[in-house]
Amino acid sequence: MTPELIIILTLVCVVAYTFEIVFGLAGTIIMVTVMSYVIDPQTLVVYSALPQILVATIGLYRTPSHLDVKTLGTMMIYASLGAVAGLWLFYYFSADVFRVLLASAITIFGLYLVIAPGRLRLTPMLRRSLDTVSGVSQGLFGISGPIAMTRLLATFDHKTAIRNHALAFFLSMNLFRVAGYLINGTFTAEIQVAMLWSAPVLAVGLWFANHLHFKVNEQWFRSVVAWAILAGGISMLLT
Protein backbone atom coordinates (compact mmCIF):
# COMPACT_ATOMS: atom_id res chain seq x y z
CA MET A 1 0.00 0.00 0.00
CA THR A 2 1.61 3.25 -1.16
CA PRO A 3 1.77 6.39 1.06
CA GLU A 4 -0.68 8.10 -1.30
CA LEU A 5 -3.14 5.24 -0.94
CA ILE A 6 -2.84 5.32 2.85
CA ILE A 7 -3.63 9.06 2.80
CA ILE A 8 -6.71 8.47 0.63
CA LEU A 9 -7.82 5.57 2.85
CA THR A 10 -7.42 7.74 5.96
CA LEU A 11 -9.45 10.62 4.52
CA VAL A 12 -12.22 8.27 3.41
CA CYS A 13 -12.25 6.74 6.89
CA VAL A 14 -12.53 10.15 8.56
CA VAL A 15 -15.70 10.85 6.55
CA ALA A 16 -17.14 7.33 6.79
CA TYR A 17 -16.55 6.89 10.51
CA THR A 18 -17.76 10.39 11.31
CA PHE A 19 -21.11 9.11 10.05
CA GLU A 20 -20.75 6.05 12.28
CA ILE A 21 -19.85 7.97 15.43
CA VAL A 22 -22.93 10.17 14.88
CA PHE A 23 -25.47 7.50 13.89
CA GLY A 24 -23.90 4.31 15.22
CA LEU A 25 -23.43 2.37 11.99
CA ALA A 26 -22.40 2.23 8.31
CA GLY A 27 -18.78 3.43 8.61
CA THR A 28 -17.30 0.17 7.38
CA ILE A 29 -19.94 -0.27 4.68
CA ILE A 30 -19.11 3.19 3.31
CA MET A 31 -15.35 2.66 3.57
CA VAL A 32 -15.34 -0.78 1.93
CA THR A 33 -17.74 0.32 -0.81
CA VAL A 34 -15.51 3.28 -1.76
CA MET A 35 -12.05 1.74 -1.29
CA SER A 36 -12.64 -1.79 -2.61
CA TYR A 37 -11.97 -0.49 -6.13
CA VAL A 38 -8.29 0.02 -5.26
CA ILE A 39 -7.67 -2.18 -2.19
CA ASP A 40 -8.54 -5.84 -1.65
CA PRO A 41 -11.83 -6.01 0.31
CA GLN A 42 -10.49 -8.64 2.72
CA THR A 43 -7.59 -6.31 3.59
CA LEU A 44 -10.09 -3.51 4.21
CA VAL A 45 -12.17 -5.73 6.51
CA VAL A 46 -9.10 -6.49 8.64
CA TYR A 47 -8.02 -2.82 8.65
CA SER A 48 -11.53 -1.72 9.68
CA ALA A 49 -10.92 -3.07 13.20
CA LEU A 50 -8.86 0.08 13.93
CA PRO A 51 -11.43 2.78 13.07
CA GLN A 52 -14.27 0.74 14.57
CA ILE A 53 -12.46 0.44 17.91
CA LEU A 54 -11.61 4.15 17.84
CA VAL A 55 -15.24 5.10 17.11
CA ALA A 56 -16.60 2.96 19.94
CA THR A 57 -13.97 4.03 22.48
CA ILE A 58 -14.24 7.76 21.76
CA GLY A 59 -18.03 7.70 21.47
CA LEU A 60 -18.50 5.91 24.78
CA TYR A 61 -15.88 7.98 26.60
CA ARG A 62 -17.30 11.31 25.46
CA THR A 63 -20.99 10.43 25.90
CA PRO A 64 -21.88 9.53 29.51
CA SER A 65 -24.83 7.17 29.36
CA HIS A 66 -26.31 4.27 31.31
CA LEU A 67 -25.90 0.90 29.62
CA ASP A 68 -28.38 -1.91 30.15
CA VAL A 69 -25.92 -4.63 31.14
CA LYS A 70 -28.50 -7.41 30.88
CA THR A 71 -29.48 -6.51 27.31
CA LEU A 72 -25.89 -5.97 26.26
CA GLY A 73 -24.75 -9.20 27.90
CA THR A 74 -27.47 -11.23 26.17
CA MET A 75 -26.52 -9.71 22.82
CA MET A 76 -22.86 -10.57 23.42
CA ILE A 77 -23.50 -14.20 24.36
CA TYR A 78 -25.32 -15.01 21.13
CA ALA A 79 -23.18 -12.71 18.98
CA SER A 80 -19.97 -14.32 20.29
CA LEU A 81 -21.20 -17.73 19.20
CA GLY A 82 -21.99 -16.26 15.80
CA ALA A 83 -18.62 -14.50 15.62
CA VAL A 84 -16.77 -17.80 16.10
CA ALA A 85 -18.64 -19.17 13.09
CA GLY A 86 -18.02 -15.96 11.16
CA LEU A 87 -14.27 -16.01 11.77
CA TRP A 88 -14.13 -19.67 10.75
CA LEU A 89 -15.92 -18.83 7.51
CA PHE A 90 -13.61 -15.83 6.99
CA TYR A 91 -10.58 -18.14 6.81
CA TYR A 92 -11.95 -21.31 5.27
CA PHE A 93 -14.94 -20.63 3.03
CA SER A 94 -16.05 -18.41 0.19
CA ALA A 95 -18.33 -15.72 1.57
CA ASP A 96 -20.34 -15.17 -1.62
CA VAL A 97 -23.49 -17.10 -0.66
CA PHE A 98 -23.59 -15.77 2.89
CA ARG A 99 -22.99 -12.24 1.60
CA VAL A 100 -26.05 -12.45 -0.65
CA LEU A 101 -28.18 -13.86 2.18
CA LEU A 102 -26.93 -11.22 4.63
CA ALA A 103 -27.43 -8.39 2.13
CA SER A 104 -30.94 -9.64 1.41
CA ALA A 105 -31.79 -9.76 5.13
CA ILE A 106 -30.38 -6.27 5.72
CA THR A 107 -32.35 -4.92 2.75
CA ILE A 108 -35.58 -6.46 4.05
CA PHE A 109 -35.06 -4.99 7.52
CA GLY A 110 -34.19 -1.63 5.97
CA LEU A 111 -37.34 -1.65 3.85
CA TYR A 112 -39.43 -2.47 6.89
CA LEU A 113 -37.91 0.36 8.95
CA VAL A 114 -38.32 2.86 6.09
CA ILE A 115 -41.90 1.87 5.18
CA ALA A 116 -43.11 1.20 8.75
CA PRO A 117 -40.95 3.43 10.96
CA GLY A 118 -42.61 2.23 14.19
CA ARG A 119 -40.62 -0.06 16.46
CA LEU A 120 -40.10 -3.60 15.17
CA ARG A 121 -41.78 -6.17 17.42
CA LEU A 122 -39.11 -8.50 18.71
CA THR A 123 -39.97 -12.02 19.77
CA PRO A 124 -37.38 -13.85 21.92
CA MET A 125 -36.47 -16.03 18.93
CA LEU A 126 -36.06 -13.06 16.57
CA ARG A 127 -33.99 -11.21 19.18
CA ARG A 128 -31.58 -14.12 19.59
CA SER A 129 -31.44 -14.71 15.84
CA LEU A 130 -30.52 -11.07 15.17
CA ASP A 131 -27.81 -11.18 17.86
CA THR A 132 -26.33 -14.39 16.44
CA VAL A 133 -26.42 -13.22 12.82
CA SER A 134 -24.83 -9.89 13.78
CA GLY A 135 -21.95 -11.87 15.34
CA VAL A 136 -21.54 -14.03 12.23
CA SER A 137 -21.54 -10.91 10.07
CA GLN A 138 -18.96 -9.19 12.31
CA GLY A 139 -16.60 -12.14 12.19
CA LEU A 140 -16.98 -12.66 8.46
CA PHE A 141 -17.32 -9.14 7.04
CA GLY A 142 -16.32 -6.84 9.93
CA ILE A 143 -19.85 -5.42 9.58
CA SER A 144 -22.69 -5.98 12.03
CA GLY A 145 -24.20 -2.49 12.28
CA PRO A 146 -27.37 -2.95 10.18
CA ILE A 147 -28.42 -6.12 12.03
CA ALA A 148 -27.45 -4.88 15.50
CA MET A 149 -29.07 -1.49 14.96
CA THR A 150 -32.29 -3.11 13.73
CA ARG A 151 -32.40 -4.97 17.04
CA LEU A 152 -31.51 -1.89 19.13
CA LEU A 153 -34.02 0.38 17.39
CA ALA A 154 -36.69 -2.08 18.53
CA THR A 155 -35.28 -2.22 22.08
CA PHE A 156 -34.62 1.40 23.09
CA ASP A 157 -36.44 4.70 22.57
CA HIS A 158 -33.70 7.33 22.92
CA LYS A 159 -31.15 7.89 20.15
CA THR A 160 -28.19 8.20 22.52
CA ALA A 161 -29.11 4.94 24.26
CA ILE A 162 -29.43 3.24 20.87
CA ARG A 163 -26.10 4.57 19.65
CA ASN A 164 -24.19 3.90 22.87
CA HIS A 165 -25.41 0.32 23.19
CA ALA A 166 -24.40 -0.15 19.55
CA LEU A 167 -20.93 1.28 20.23
CA ALA A 168 -20.46 -0.90 23.33
CA PHE A 169 -21.54 -3.95 21.33
CA PHE A 170 -19.23 -3.09 18.42
CA LEU A 171 -16.28 -2.47 20.76
CA SER A 172 -16.67 -5.89 22.34
CA MET A 173 -17.14 -7.64 19.01
CA ASN A 174 -14.18 -5.91 17.40
CA LEU A 175 -11.90 -6.82 20.29
CA PHE A 176 -13.11 -10.39 19.80
CA ARG A 177 -12.32 -10.11 16.09
CA VAL A 178 -8.86 -8.64 16.77
CA ALA A 179 -8.08 -11.57 19.07
CA GLY A 180 -8.99 -13.96 16.26
CA TYR A 181 -6.81 -12.05 13.80
CA LEU A 182 -3.85 -12.09 16.20
CA ILE A 183 -4.19 -15.82 16.77
CA ASN A 184 -4.20 -16.43 13.02
CA GLY A 185 -1.48 -13.87 12.15
CA THR A 186 -3.83 -11.84 9.95
CA PHE A 187 -2.34 -8.39 10.57
CA THR A 188 0.15 -8.22 7.73
CA ALA A 189 2.99 -5.67 7.67
CA GLU A 190 1.05 -3.68 5.06
CA ILE A 191 -2.02 -3.43 7.29
CA GLN A 192 0.06 -2.55 10.35
CA VAL A 193 1.79 0.31 8.50
CA ALA A 194 -1.56 1.66 7.29
CA MET A 195 -2.95 1.49 10.83
CA LEU A 196 0.13 3.16 12.32
CA TRP A 197 -0.02 6.15 9.98
CA SER A 198 -3.78 6.64 9.93
CA ALA A 199 -4.55 6.11 13.64
CA PRO A 200 -3.54 9.63 14.89
CA VAL A 201 -5.51 11.41 12.16
CA LEU A 202 -8.56 9.24 12.73
CA ALA A 203 -8.40 9.68 16.51
CA VAL A 204 -8.30 13.48 16.28
CA GLY A 205 -11.02 13.66 13.61
CA LEU A 206 -13.39 11.34 15.46
CA TRP A 207 -12.76 13.05 18.81
CA PHE A 208 -14.20 16.29 17.43
CA ALA A 209 -16.84 14.62 15.25
CA ASN A 210 -18.50 12.99 18.26
CA HIS A 211 -20.31 16.20 19.28
CA LEU A 212 -22.32 16.15 16.03
CA HIS A 213 -24.45 13.34 17.51
CA PHE A 214 -26.08 15.80 19.90
CA LYS A 215 -27.13 18.07 17.01
CA VAL A 216 -29.38 15.38 15.53
CA ASN A 217 -33.01 15.15 16.66
CA GLU A 218 -34.72 11.85 17.49
CA GLN A 219 -36.94 11.58 14.42
CA TRP A 220 -34.16 12.41 11.98
CA PHE A 221 -31.83 9.96 13.75
CA ARG A 222 -34.24 7.04 13.28
CA SER A 223 -34.97 8.03 9.69
CA VAL A 224 -31.29 8.29 8.72
CA VAL A 225 -30.47 4.98 10.44
CA ALA A 226 -33.34 3.23 8.65
CA TRP A 227 -32.23 4.56 5.25
CA ALA A 228 -28.59 3.70 6.06
CA ILE A 229 -29.59 0.10 6.81
CA LEU A 230 -31.50 -0.11 3.53
CA ALA A 231 -28.65 1.49 1.55
CA GLY A 232 -26.14 -0.83 3.23
CA GLY A 233 -28.10 -3.90 2.20
CA ILE A 234 -28.52 -2.70 -1.38
CA SER A 235 -24.82 -1.76 -1.66
CA MET A 236 -23.81 -5.23 -0.45
CA LEU A 237 -26.12 -6.82 -3.01
CA LEU A 238 -24.66 -4.68 -5.82
CA THR A 239 -21.02 -5.27 -4.86
Image (spheres, rainbow, N blue to C red):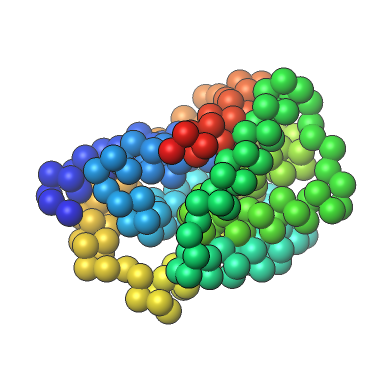
Reply above or below: 103 against 224: below
Based on the displayed image, in which of its 4 quarters is residue 111 positioned?
A: top right
Q: Residue at x 25, y 64 (%)?
A: 192
In the rendered structure, the answer to whether residue 184 lies left or right of residue 81 reads left
Reply above or below: 185 against 66: below
Based on the displayed image, in which of its 4 quarters is residue 10 positioned?
A: top left
Q: What is the count of numbered marks?
A: 0
Based on the displayed image, in which of its 4 quarters is residue 77 positioned?
A: bottom right
Q: In which quarter of the image is the C terminus?
A: top left
Does the image show residue 183? yes
Front residue of 210 and 6: 6
Front residue of 196 and 113: 113
Does the image show residue 174? no
- The percent coordinates of residue 232 (x first, y second) are 52, 35
Q: Residue furthest left?
A: 3
In the rendered structure, the answer to whether residue 222 lies left or right of residue 25 reads right
- The percent coordinates of residue 147 (x first, y second) are 64, 45
Q: Residue at x 65, y 31 (%)?
A: 110
Front residue of 180 and 37: 37
Q: Which residue is drawn at 74% across and 24% down?
A: 117
Q: Quadrant of the N terminus?
A: bottom left
In the rendered structure, the answer to whether residue 85 lies left or right of residue 140 reads right
- The percent coordinates of residue 188 (x first, y second) are 27, 68
Q: Residue at x 83, y 43 (%)?
A: 122
Q: Residue furthest right?
A: 123
